[in-house]
Image (cartoon, rainbow, N blue to C red):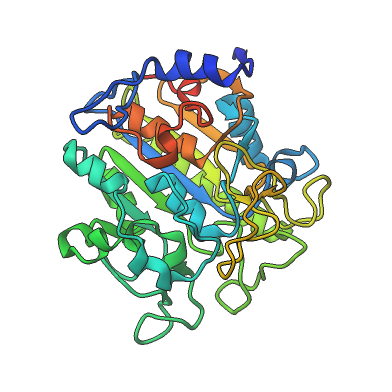
Amino acid sequence: MKTRHIAAVSAGAIALALALPPLANASGGVSGGPGGSSARAHTFVIMMENAGSDELLTPTNTNTKYIQHLAATYGLATDYFGVTHPSLPNYLAATSGSIWDSNSDNTAQKTLLDHVNIVDQLEAARVSWKGYMEGLPYPGFLGDSADYTATPHSSGNALYLLKHNPFLLYPDIYNNPARAKKVVPLTQLATDLANNRVPQFSWITPNICNDMHGMSGPACPYPSTGAGPSAQQYAQGDAFLHRWVNMITKSKAWTKGSVIFITWDEGGYSNIAPFSPVSTAGCCDSPILSNPPVNPVDVSGGDLTTGQVFGGGLVPMIVINAGSQRHLVDATPTNHYSLLRTIEAMYHLDYLGQAGDTNQVHSLMSLVRR
């Protein structure tokens, strides 16, 4: 196994090397750069929760050995960040190129999220897609949370949460039954893999117990606390990834050019220096909280020069390529906007929102082998 380190370079050099001169499309937007995508290739995104690089990748954490194995064997972005806190805006960033001024997990915001998103792009380009959500009761379920032990499937010991399902936060998806039904229970992925009916683009969200977030209740007795994930939460997330990565890579869908992106929405809430108690480290168009905040009465404040970056903390980004066990390491600062930019480049799509900021947002194409 070979390891190749890719040095961090200036923003201008990355923009030239990875994006090339942006190509103007018919509407004047910025078009996706090179990378290509075979019609037979499949892209999988697995979004985990609330754990940072230091706690997951340290050899002393004996409950994340599979994650450490993946990070040491395949592609790893070592300077990858959540865009902000808390969870929901990170899912928006990865699928629409903006957090839309949100720093809240309140799913009532969905009525305000009528924006162009990755699904609009994929469908316009005739790229098939599905969202696989663990714990979703049935395809197109629009509830805020779901629990198989309750009737109807809501609240209780809810292990599925809408805030971790970006697709059904966008009105042009949840108001369209045909689109909404492409958001399905994760159990469907096992069937699709077995029948070789996996779409070209797949998003996978574990339930709130398997994603390392945790909750307090009989269905998942591992509460999410200021102390960070427990040993059992680490172990459950590690086992979840072991199961599904193995299932994907041993299936007929694991064709030449296929790739799996594994990351975490935001850093952990654990007391590990220097990310204590919550890391706000970030990069690449993470929000800057003005200081003092803007006063709408006299229009004072709102100064960014004295503001603070409110990033989501350092998290792993692991990239697994079909047919390659080459260990690649990229230390370029990147985040969820970079993930979106990379997917768009792979499918020759326009860059949405901050994903098109060639000065600040760099792709992960150095870790992709297509």
Q: Quadrant of residue 217?
A: bottom right
Vertical side of 261 occupied by 21: above or below: above
Residue closest to the eye, 265 or 245: 265
Decide if residue 196 is in sight here.
no
Residue found at the very far bottom of the displayed protein: 151
Please state, as top left, top right, bottom left or bottom right, where the C terminus lies in the image.
top left
Vertical side of 159 occupied by 197: above or below: above
Residue closest to the eye, 118 or 198: 118
Residue closest to the eye, 315 or 100: 100
Q: Quadrant of residue 64?
A: top right
Please state, as top left, top right, bottom left or bottom right, where the N terminus lies in the image.
top right
Vertical side of 154 occupied by 229: above or below: above
Which residue appears at 50% of the width and 60% of the height? 102
Residue 48 place in picture, x, y as percent = 54, 51
Decide if residue 269 is in sight here.
yes
Q: Quadrant of residue 166?
A: bottom left
Which residue appears at 66% of the width and 36% of the height? 68
Residue 42 place in picture, x, y as percent = 31, 34
Which residue appears at 59% of the width and 28% of the height? 76
Marker count (numbered): 0
Residue 53 place in picture, x, y as percent = 69, 41
Tell me if 337 is positioned left or right of 273 in this view: left
Tell me if 230 is positioned left or right of 143 in this view: right
